[in-house]
Amino acid sequence: SWLGFAGVELPGEYDTDRELAGRIYEKAKAKGIPVVDINFAALSGEYSRFPLTWGELIPLHFLEKRPLVLVTPARKVPRETLVRFGEVLAEVLEDYEKKVALIISADHGHAHDPNGPYGYVPESKEYDELIMGLIREDRLEELLNIDD
């Protein structure tokens, strides 16, 4: 497979839940959060595509294939803005009548294997354990205190 996992094929096309995407976009924009509503190649139809990377395809592989909304914040967005965006997501999803899975990647602790593409550093495990502990213990506000 193109992802480097021998014998594993991941479907690469998912429909977009345009209604949910629109609600998230409009509410975030109304709250002054810097958001953009983007398409790739065309606004609609067969040429309307947004390329997915392994960062999206791997978790999507484990879920039932349903329409999705892809949210990819720029890496330099301040944490406080991300928290405000998370609050907007919560507000929108509370009123949304369909089931929704929320997948979030911290995108930091990738260096777990000396033979992997990112090598090995012990801080990756420590970071993952810290993040998972804060989530399990519902101490999300402490995420703002982690050094960059």
Image (cartoon, rainbow, N blue to C red):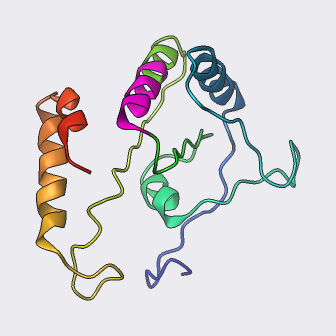
For image coordinates 18% across by 55% down, the residue present is 128
Residue 30 location, quadrant: top right
> Residue 54, how many percent across, how many down?
50, 66
Q: What residue span does the magenta drawing correspond to?
A: 78-88
Q: How many numbered badges does the structure rendering display?
A: 0
> Residue 111, how many percent across, how many down?
25, 73
Q: Nearer the viewer, residue 52 or 61?
A: 52
> Residue 35, how many percent across, how many down?
62, 33
Residue 28 location, quadrant: top right
Is 44 above or below relative to 18?
below
Decide whether the magenta segment is chiefly helix, strand or loop: helix
For image coordinates 47% across by 24% down, the residue present is 89
Is residue 26 shown in magenta?
A: no
For image coordinates 51% across by 60% down, the residue present is 57
Is 133 above or below relative to 47?
above
> Residue 40, how many percent across, how many down?
78, 52
Residue 15 location, quadrant: top right
Q: Is residue 4 left or right of residue 83?
A: right
For image coordinates 47% across by 76% down, the residue present is 8
Q: Residue furthest top?
A: 95
Q: Is residue 117 left or right of residue 4?
A: left
Q: Is residue 31 left or right of residue 112?
A: right
